[in-house]
């Protein structure tokens, strides 16, 4: 027996769609307290600012990145403690420019997360106060989490 699955709606997603219209590429209710939107990277700061200051999303808990064949995606997990809801914001970033606005003016927790994404994937967070490598030496060539990263000789490994 198959069931017709109705598209779920949520007041937060409806408000975001109302405010930002076609800047929301996709919106989805994963569970009652788990939401996801996909946006173009150039809209990330405005949408994040709205989430924080109008919808009470007060805690940026993580930032990650994904390397797809045609684009990068920066993935933000943002909590609203008053609402007890997590929203995942997937921001599409052009591979050629690999640039997106920093969210450090909104959440100080973005600082190290953005540095890690920069260090491993090479995405530049415009306006970041201290964007430099966090794990790898400053003279390290390339970005190890990119799919086009070539693994070369291992200078730290010496055969006897």
Image: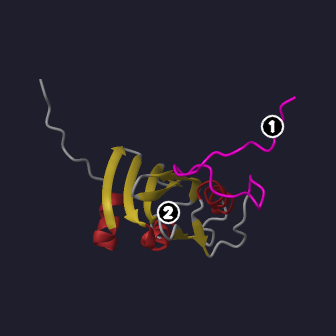
Q: Which residues are magenta?
A: 134-160
Viewed as shown, does residue 11 lie left or right of 100? left
Task: Residue 111: name its quadrant.
Answer: bottom right
Q: Identify the element where label 1 is drawn.
A: loop
Question: Residue at the spot x=33%, y=59% of the render?
Answer: 13
* Residue 42 location (% of width, % of height): 44, 73
Residue 23 image point, x, y percent: 33, 70
The image's colouring method is secondary structure
Q: Is residue 21 above or below residue 145?
A: below
Q: How many marks?
A: 2
Kindly identify which numbered label has been placed on residue 56.
2
Residue appearing at x 14%, y 32% in the figure:
3
Q: Looking at the image, which is closer to me, 128 or 28? A: 128
Under tag 2, what secondary structure? Answer: loop
Q: Is the residue 138 above or below the residue 156 in the image?
A: below
The majority secondary structure of the magenta stretch comes to loop
62 lies left or right of 138: left
Observer-nearest of 129 and 152: 152
- Give the percent coordinates (x, y) of residue 12: 36, 59
Task: Please give the residue where the numbered disc 1 appears in the rendered image.
Answer: 157
């Amino acid at each position: 027996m198959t069931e017709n699955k109705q598209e779920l709606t949520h007041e937060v997603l409806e408000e975001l769609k109302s405010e930002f219209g076609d800047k929301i590429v996709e919106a989805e209710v994963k569970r009652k307290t788990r939401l996801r939107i996909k946006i173009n990277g150039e809209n990330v700061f405005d949408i994040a600012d709205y989430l924080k200051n109008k919808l009470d999303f007060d805690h940026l808990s993580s930032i990650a990145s994904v390397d797809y064949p045609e684009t990068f995606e920066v993935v933000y997990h943002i909590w609203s403690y008053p609402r007890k809801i997590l929203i995942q914001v997937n921001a599409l970033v052009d591979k050629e420019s690999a640039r997106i606005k920093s969210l450090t003016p909104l959440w100080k927790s973005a600082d190290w997360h953005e540095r890690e994404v920069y260090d491993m994937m090479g995405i530049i967070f415009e306006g970041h106060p201290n964007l430099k490598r966090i794990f790898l030496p400053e003279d390290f060539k390339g970005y190890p989490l990119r799919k086009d990263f070539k693994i070369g000789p291992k200078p730290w490994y010496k055969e006897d």
